[in-house]
Image (tube, rainbow, N blue to C red):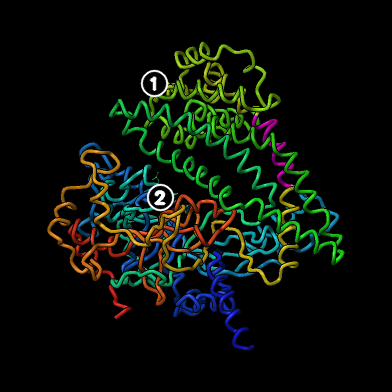
């Protein structure tokens, strides 16, 4: 009897350890540590996070506020994804030295390239501050009043926290505002580019393979952190020296096998795991289809131009990739929610919730689900309008985006005067310049016409500007693109000459600006206020609902939604079955790169040198026991955007891979993690080493790393 009990316990435990979760590194003791050990880890909670001694967390850095990176040598060598370093690699590239196309490898410290706007943040310590943040809150306050007090308290706590002069503090909300943590951080601002493979390796497979497995992308790049002579953060200086980290990750040469323990340590951006069914339904059936449809329209137009014009292809490659990235993600997310029956499952949970609330007579919770129904019905139309505005007025059309920046600047002039205008001007010009650096009015114009047409015909009428109704759009489009200055860099720049008043007057008589202004005004004066009002109420209900779930289901594991703070997620190396009778094995090999090879193709070309190494089987110590070079592998780690560049760590704390993507069928994990089908995709560390050593000949970089054999 007892044995059966233990067996059942183990079974439940094993499977629960596969249920995903993004955990706070300072709170791993107990349940997480046990689960990790069940999965094969030899690490203690303290090996991962420790305030008094160095630990794994000291090797992990938030990269430019978006991606993750990790230190892999005692000299501050930093590893992240190629797509995370893309902007920096691009910014050092010229027609003669195209590092995106050919790759870049600094031969010594002197050749490493500084990056003006790049920084990385380390976490020094994490402290719970819930009681102080919520001090003074009462039930009679409105959501607005509560939020204001929370902000006030947080600012005071951030200021009062004892820190060193070079450190910063930031408070973040967890469990929908039921818990708060203070983060003490250190920011290094001298981070230099060290190496990057050519895009034909670092971006191999491009958009066709994006979000897919089998995958064969060597999505990595190398940077180095520099510090001042005292090893402290400092602005760029030629006198700075390589940073000596508190910890760096050794790299395992022994590779991975199915079921090996994996831990991914990084900065996941945003998830929504505790939504009511009505919210998932709205995302899947209202918001996602609108956004997908808009992007489909614009991508189809841009794609046509890119295919017939080499110059446009280069200019639009990066924009196209970023629009296509979430277009494809949302399609996968919708299919996954549908296929896994996530909405029905969430409804079942809500039935159980309602029954428990009744049984226990918990009056404070009985209104929650009906409130969600009411509020999501209330927000539906305005939320849809907001999606159309952000996709059309901001993301997909550049004339409208340029005019948005101009609109914000003009408003600054009208509401806050000349000085505020002058203060804002340089950053506005900066953003505008970036738009026109890779711009073609020929491409932008048909996108404008098609998207504005969609806005007018698909957005609820009360959110369509009056001037857009009964419009001859094709005539207006021609007029706008014929006369507006927001169609070329020099013309746009000429608008901004002279005094603030002259600039404002000139902008305000531009035909393109006048058209865009009506749309942006509709957003700022009508759509956004209405959206925020209801959204704040939803946040209030969601906070109580989160608390109620945790109280009513005390045996379930609840992890806080991602919020761009440092998290640990763990699992195992595992393949998956995407559909009936198909099984994807966990590891892909260099053989697969050669299978996909299409000479001259912009997604699937393979550099000559790599083909030569393959034919000669010149793999050094980086092949597996069967003589094959692994390229990517899959795991059951629960990741999301922001986990790009996160290290995959083995049972002993060594680097085994570099996270860069998820599989398409599992992208719904942002709302509904399903251990059957959700997988993250990592580049195998041995492929990274192979490319650095054998392909790039950058042996000096390998020499500063610590390569280990934990399995021997
Ligand atoms: N899907 C990955 C992530 O969300 C990789 C994106 C790289 N971009 C691309 N279009 N291939 O960000
Ligand atoms: N590629 C994503 C990023 O840029 C990570 C993949 C994901 O969303 O899981 O962060």
Residue range highlighted in magenta: 523-536
Of 271 and 56, nearer the camera is 271
Residue annotated with mark 2:
212
In screen coordinates, is 508 left or right of 702? right
Please report the residue visible at 41 percent of the width from the left and 76 percent of the height from the top. 651
Q: Quadrant of residue 87?
A: top left
Q: Quadrant of residue 404?
A: top right
In screen coordinates, is 442 left or right of 524? left
Q: Looking at the rendering, in which quadrant would you find the N terminus? A: bottom right
Residue annotated with mark 1:
442
Q: Is residue 535 magenta?
A: yes
Of 259 and 157, nearer the camera is 259
Q: Position of residue 571 (x, y in %)?
A: 48, 68
Residue 18 lies, with reference to residue 422, above or below; the image says below
Q: Residues within 10 Å of mark 2 (few under 14, many from 20)?
A: some
Mark 1 to mark 2 CA distance (whole Å)? 32 Å
Instruction: Name the N-terminal-most of marks 1 and 2.
Output: 2
Residue 330 lies, with reference to residue 620, above or below; the image says above
Residue 246 lies, with reference to residue 141, above or below; the image says below
Q: Position of residue 278 (x, y in %)?
A: 70, 47
Q: Secondary structure at mark 1?
A: helix
- Whether disc 1's CB lies below 8 Å from ligand 1 is answered no
Q: Position of residue 627 (x, y in %)?
A: 21, 66
Q: Residue furthest front?
A: 581
């Amino acid at each position: 009897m007892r044995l059966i009990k233990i067996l059942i316990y183990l079974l439940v435990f094993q499977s629960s350890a596969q249920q995903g979760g993004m955990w706070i590194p300072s709170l791993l003791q107990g349940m997480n540590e046990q689960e990790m050990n069940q999965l094969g880890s030899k690490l203690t909670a303290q090996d991962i996070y420790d305030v008094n001694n160095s630990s794994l967390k000291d090797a992990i850095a938030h990269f430019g506020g978006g991606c993750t990176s990790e230190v892999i040598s005692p000299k501050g060598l930093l590893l992240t994804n190629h797509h995370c370093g893309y902007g920096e690699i691009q910014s050092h590239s010229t027609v003669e030295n195209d590092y995106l196309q050919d790759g870049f490898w600094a031969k010594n410290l002197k050749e490493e390239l500084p990056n003006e706007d790049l920084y990385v943040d380390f976490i020094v310590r994490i402290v719970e501050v819930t009681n102080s943040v919520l001090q003074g809150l009462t039930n009679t306050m409105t959501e607005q009043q509560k939020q204001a007090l929370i902000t006030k308290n947080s600012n005071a706590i951030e200021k009062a926290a004892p820190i060193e002069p070079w450190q910063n503090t930031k408070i973040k909300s967890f469990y929908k505002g039921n818990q708060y943590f203070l983060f003490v951080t250190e920011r290094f601002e001298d981070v230099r580019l060290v190496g990057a493979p050519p895009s034909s390796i670092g971006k191999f497979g491009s958009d066709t393979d994006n979000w897919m497995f089998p995958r064969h992308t060597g999505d990595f790049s190398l940077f180095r952190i520099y510090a001042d002579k005292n090893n402290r953060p400092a602005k760029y200086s030629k006198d700075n020296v390589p940073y000596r980290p508190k910890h760096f990750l050794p790299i395992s040469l022994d590779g991975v096998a199915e079921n090996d323990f994996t831990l991914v340590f990084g900065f996941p951006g945003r998830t929504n795991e505790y939504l009511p069914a009505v919210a998932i339904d709205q995302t899947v059936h209202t918001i996602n289809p609108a956004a997908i449809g808009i992007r489909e329209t614009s991508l189809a137009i841009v794609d046509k131009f890119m295919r017939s014009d080499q110059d446009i292809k280069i200019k639009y490659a990066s924009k196209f990739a970023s629009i296509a990235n979430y277009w494809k993600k949302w399609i996968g997310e919708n299919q996954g929610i549908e296929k896994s029956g996530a909405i029905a499952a969430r409804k079942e949970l809500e039935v159980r919730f309602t029954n428990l609330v009744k049984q226990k007579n918990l009056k404070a919770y009985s209104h929650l689900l009906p409130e969600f129904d009411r509020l999501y019905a209330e927000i539906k139309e305005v939320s849809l309008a907001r999606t159309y505005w952000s996709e059309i007025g901001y993301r997909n059309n550049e004339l409208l985006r340029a005019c948005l920046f101009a609109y914000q600047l003009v408003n600054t002039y009208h509401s806050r005067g000349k000085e505020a205008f002058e203060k804002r001007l340089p950053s506005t010009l900066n953003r505008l310049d970036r738009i026109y650096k890779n711009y073609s009015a020929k491409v932008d114009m048909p996108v404008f016409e098609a998207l504005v047409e969609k806005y007018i015909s698909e957005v609820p009428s009360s959110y369509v500007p009056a001037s857009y109704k009964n419009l001859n759009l094709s005539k207006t489009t021609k007029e706008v693109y014929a006369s507006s200055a927001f169609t070329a860099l020099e013309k746009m720049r000429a608008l901004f000459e002279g005094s603030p008043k002259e600039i404002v007057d000139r902008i305000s008589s531009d035909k393109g600006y006048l058209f865009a202004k009506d749309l942006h005004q509709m957003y700022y004066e009508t759509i956004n206020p209405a959206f925020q009002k209801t959204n704040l109420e939803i946040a209030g209900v969601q906070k109580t609902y989160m608390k109620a779930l945790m109280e009513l289901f005390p045996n379930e594991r609840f992890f806080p939604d991602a919020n761009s703070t440092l998290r640990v997620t763990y699992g195992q190396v595992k393949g998956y079955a995407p559909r009936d009778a198909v099984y994807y094995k966990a590891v892909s090999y260099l053989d697969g790169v050669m299978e996909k090879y299409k000479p001259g193709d912009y997604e699937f070309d393979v550099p000559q040198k790599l083909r030569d190494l393959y034919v000669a089987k010149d793999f050094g110590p980086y092949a597996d026991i069967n003589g094959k070079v692994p390229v990517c592998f899959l795991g059951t780690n629960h990741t999301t955007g922001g986990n790009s560049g996160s290290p995959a760590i083995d049972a002993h704390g060594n680097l085994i891979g570099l996270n860069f993507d998820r599989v398409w069928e599992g992208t719904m994990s942002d709302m509904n993690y399903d251990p059957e089908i959700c997988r993250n995709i990592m580049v195998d560390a041995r492929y990274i080493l192979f490319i650095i050593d054998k392909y790039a000949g950058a042996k000096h970089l390998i020499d500063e790393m610590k390569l280990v054999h934990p399995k021997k």
